[in-house]
Amino acid sequence: MLLDPDDLGAIASLTLPGRAGSSPTEVSGGGYFYLDQLDRAVVPTKDGTIQVVAVRRDALVTEARYDLAPVIGTSGIVSVLPDWSGRMWFVTGGGLVGVLDPATGAISTHALPGETIANSIAVDESGGVFVVSDHALYRFDAAAAGRPVVTWRAAYDRGSRRKPGQLSQGSGTTPTLIGPADGPGGGYVAITDNADPRMRVLVMARGKAGPEKVCEQPVFGPGKGADENSLVAVGDDLIVENNYGYVVGDHALLKGMLGGRQVDTEPGLARVHVDYTTRTCSLAWSDHRERFRASSARSPSRRACSTPSPTRAPTNCGRPAGRAPRRCPTPGT
């Protein structure tokens, strides 16, 4: 959809190929997409293709199409993101990690046997591509000819069940990247696990040397924590929210999609402080109360990348002042 920024009226629409999913929480085939350097939408679709869609006057026009179906089969494309060399990295629900060279159409893949992927990925300026499956957090890098290879793998506690409000039995967080890749430890990466009885926030160094553990912090009550949103990095802190119990029928359902909040959901926000010098985590605050209060406060107009101390100055990810930010090199979806 192309919308008018003043009144949100529809200007144009483009029907993407493939059949719509039957689940209200289906994330493959367009759940995640990005805008490229030409402000074109790069969208994975339900028929196993990646479509590059541009705005031309008041119309949406498909300018390029890449067919991944011969390689991925019937497994849906969960997400696609570019790296700093112009390659397109993609992941599928069936645990396939791939690289597409848009100049040649060449595709290389790496399978994660017995694992599934239900989250987007994160990419940093050193070439690292961070993927969380339902078993482990990975760093991939491109080898010769762009082939994806595992640089390191960090298994986490995936718990004993898929909790209500989750899309899979595992982490529900796209990896959050913190700090520059040329900083200590090659920068940091954070996710939540799915541990019982309490879910934990995990922070580790993300450089090529390996996933060196920084710290971990349990959040929310025993048996009452689940997260299906990426952590938000603010300075030296991480904000985590609770999705436990958001379901419709037997489908995990994120808040606000259908039916509103249900009586068996567990509210909660928590702020975890990370001391990168002493490599410790602590719970700055946690609030499980429900509040309904009108507010006249305006939402921030820009989203800044997060950098741990001692360099705290936020950036707008290289966008000119007054322009909407592109996706930061610290994605958090």
Image (cartoon, rainbow, N blue to C red):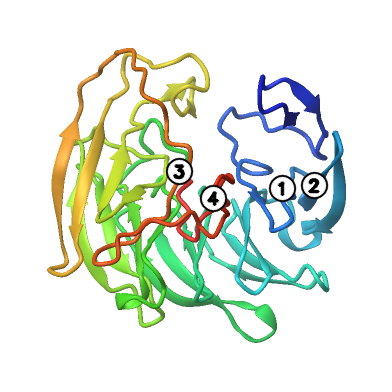
Residue wearing tag 1 = 43
Label 2 Cα neighbours within 10 Å, binned few <14 / some 14-19 / many ≥20: many
Indicate whether 176 appears above or below 210.
Answer: above
Of marks 1 and 3, the one in the foreground: 1
- Going 69% across and 58% down the picture, which residue do you hit? 37
Amino acid identity at mark 4: Ala
Q: Earlier in the sequence, mark 2 or mark 1?
A: 1
Indicate whether 215 appears above or below 58.
Answer: below
Q: Earlier in the sequence, mark 3 or mark 4?
A: 3
Residue wearing tag 4 = 321
Of marks 2 and 1, the one in the foreground: 2
Residue 260: x and y, percent? Answer: 44, 15
Instruction: Determine whether label 2 and label 1 are within 8 Å by CB.
Output: yes
CA–CA distance between discs 2 and 1? 8 Å
Residue wearing tag 3 = 168
Residue 180 occupies which quadrant of the picture?
A: bottom left
Label 3 Cα neighbours within 10 Å, binned few <14 / some 14-19 / many ≥20: many
- Going 49% across and 20% down the picture, which residue do you hit? 249
Residue wearing tag 2 = 53
- Going 34% across and 57% down the picture, which residue do you hit? 190
- Going 37% across and 56% down the picture, which residue do you hit? 306
Of marks 3 and 4, the one in the foreground: 4
Q: Is residue 45 left or right of residue 120?
A: right
Amino acid identity at mark 2: Val
Of marks 1 and 4, the one in the foreground: 4
